[in-house]
Amino acid sequence: MQSPAVRVAHIITRMILGGAQENTLHVCDALHRRAAWDVLLITGPPIGPEGELLSEVRRRGIPHVVVPEMRRAVNPYYDAVAFVRLLHILRQFKPAVVQTHSSKAGILGRFAARTAGVPAIIHTVEGLPFHRYAPALSNAAFILAERAAARLTDRIVCVAQAMVTQAVSAGIRPRQGYSVIYSGMDVEAYADADVHRAQVRERLGFAADDVVIGKIARLFPLKGHEYVIRAAPSIVARCPRARFLFVGDGVLKEELAARASELGVGDRFVFAGLVPPERIPAMMGAMDVVVHASLREGLARVLVQALLCGKPVVTYDLDGAPEVIVDGVTGRLVPAESVEELAEAVIDAIEHPDQARRMAGEGRRRFSDQFRIETMANSTEQLYCELLAARNK
């Protein structure tokens, strides 16, 4: 007789377009398709200008519950109501494992799971809520909250070794309480990214001989678009065919467009707006160089995606970036917040395309298997089994 499926609940603040959300979607989908697991996704509403993935959750038939009061912003009333609702859902569903994602759901979800008596509690860190660009008081509050929640947690899963190091340094919990499970993505889709290159470039208004420098990120603070804009005049001066493609939307769109115009390069920029995940490979296929200038990441999916596409990568040297971009081997690392170094690295990739492509090819060779959806799902499943076995001893 087949054993009954083990119940697993994933809790995330909101299913917007983002790396944490894509990982959550892929893990829930993969486990939902396996007979051994009975999966429930619990999320707040996808409020904000970043797009949403909740429709994809519905399309794939993943069982889910929306908690209207679970919002990203701190609100004592909404947070209290969200906690009560989470507790009620978990007591009804009775999962053996709860895995939380993002800061708000990570705090509320872990306290609710422990109160409900869930045997195994896991929290996933795609990016820590405290960082060097945040106010000291905010960092102190987040660190205290994360330390308290960590005491309720059987394992913290990080998408990069850098996140483990930062969490340990902040005293969240000792190093032995972590596991690293890298993000998963559709490797084959990115390997075939150039199939629609000419069509996408034409639709976006690029000529065949334009050199397109692309950045994929929400148009929000700390995503680093302003550094790319400031580097653009130097790049254009050396490479007159240079054009720039920003994929994503957000509150800074008008400000960034105005800044590009002020620097005399406004006509060089194309703002493509929100693009669903399934269209990202085609957009990346239209690029010649991929730039990542974010100041706060776990391990940006776009770095791996670019390598899988065979695209040269230039990125700031921070957080998890060095775990996939080895300077001069799989891409180029430049100091965070730099402008001239960023420009020079992009120019070097343009002027030495064969060398740049060789580095990207080496990255594809090294990381294709490591970042597959199946690899992420299998590692997650193995962790569940490990924690449940330890509980049953």
Image (cartoon, grey):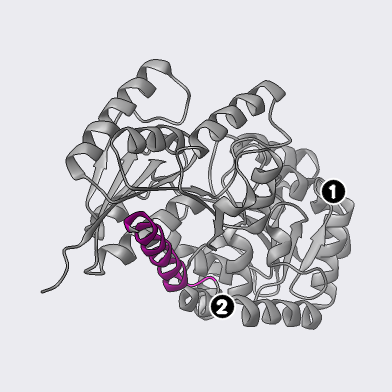
Viewer-closest of 317 and 203: 317
Q: Secondary structure at mark 2?
A: loop
Task: Kindly give the residue lying farthest to the top in the view shown.
Answer: 77
Picture disc at residue 147: none
Q: Quadrant of residue 33?
A: bottom left
Occupied quadrant, residue 325:
bottom right
| Image coordinates for residue 34, horizontal then vertical, percent | 26, 69
Residue carrying label 1: 338
Closest to the observer, 12 or 96:
96
Q: Residue at x 34, y 38 (%)?
A: 113
The three-letter code of the residue at mark 1 reads Ser
Q: Which portion, as a residue range, is magenta?
A: 371-392
Query: Is residue 18 visible in this depiction of the protein?
Result: no
Look at mark 2 in the image and give the residue it sits on: 368
**Percent of width and height locating residue 136:** 71, 24
Binning the other alpha carbons within 10 Å of mark 1 as few (below 14), some (14 to 19) or many (20 upward) gives: some
The picture places residue 52, in percent across and down from the top left corner, at 38, 46
**256 lies left or right of 87:** right
| Magenta span: chief secondary structure | helix
Q: Is residue 172 above or below residue 21?
A: above
> For the point 75% across and 78% down, which residue is it?
359
Of callouts 2 and 1, which one flags the residue occurring earlier in the amino acid sequence? 1
Q: Amino acid at mark 2?
A: Ser
Q: Residue at x 47, y 55 (%)?
A: 275
Spatial CA span between label 2 and label 1: 30 Å
Estimate how packed mark 2 is, as few (under 14), some (14 to 19) or many (20 or more) residues with alpha carbons within 10 Å. Answer: some
